[in-house]
Image (cartoon, rainbow, N blue to C red):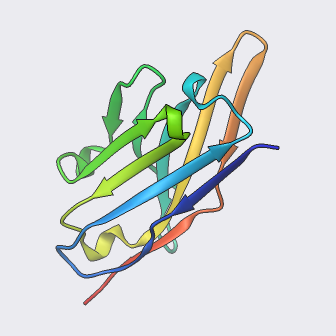
Amino acid sequence: QVQLVESGGGLAQPGGSLTLSCLASGIAVSGYDMAWYRQAPGKQRELVAKITNGGSTNYADSLKGRFTVSRDDAKKTVYLQMNNLQPEDTAVYYCNAEMRAIIGRFDYWGQGTLVTVSS
C-alpha cells in the first residue's frame, strides 16, 4: 500500500518559515519525481515545486527564491522549506509522487497539510 504522509504544517506569522516533510512508503522513492502542490480556499490546486528523481528542480515562478524543495531518498522523504511566508501562501499543501514507465503512469497523493500564515 502506497502512502505519502505530509507533516510540518501549522500557523506561521508573515515573514516566518516552515519546513514541510513528506514521508513515502510502499514505493521506491528514488524512481519517482516528487512534487509539492497547494490549494488555497476557493482556488484550484497549483504546482509549488517539483524535484525529479535525478535531482532537477523547478518552481512556480511566483515562489522562486522563497521556497526550496529537496529530497532524501534514503529516508524516503521530500522536504519543502518555505521562507518569508505571506498570507497568500495559506493553503493545504499536498505531496505528489509520479513515475512514468513503459507499463504506465503511477501517480500518488498525500492527504495534505494545512499551512496558515496570519498575524
The image shows residue 45 at horizontal and vertical percentages of 52, 56
Horizontally, residue 105 falls left or right of residue 76, namely: right
Report x, y in % for residue 26.
74, 39
In this view of the protein, which residue sits in the foreground, 39 or 36? Answer: 36
The answer to whether 109 is drawn above or below residue 115 in the figure is: above
Q: From this viewpoint, which residue is outermost toward the right?
A: 1
State whether residue 96 is above or below residue 57.
Answer: below
Q: Is residue 44 visible?
A: no
Q: Quadrant of the N terminus?
A: top right
**What x and y, as percent, mark residue 4?**
64, 50
Above/below status of 50 relative to 54: below
Q: Please name whichever residue, 73 or 50, is drawn nearer the observer in this view of the structure.
A: 73
Q: Residue at x 71, y 30 (%)?
A: 106
Q: Quadrant of residue 87?
A: bottom left
Front residue of this view, candidates 109 and 71: 71
Residue furthest bottom in the image: 119
Q: Is residue 84 left or right of residue 58?
A: left
Q: Give the residue at x 22% y 61%.
A: 83
Q: In this image, 99 relative to 39: left or right?
A: right
Image coordinates for residue 74, horizontal then vertical, percent: 51, 33
Location of the C terminus (image quadrant): bottom left
Quadrant of residue 12 within the rendered picture: bottom left
How many numbered marks, from 0 up?
Answer: 0
Residue at 18%, 66% (x, y): give it: 84
Residue sticking out furthest to the top? 102
Q: Residue at the spot x=41%, y=49% of the render? A: 79
Whether residue 81 can be seen here: yes
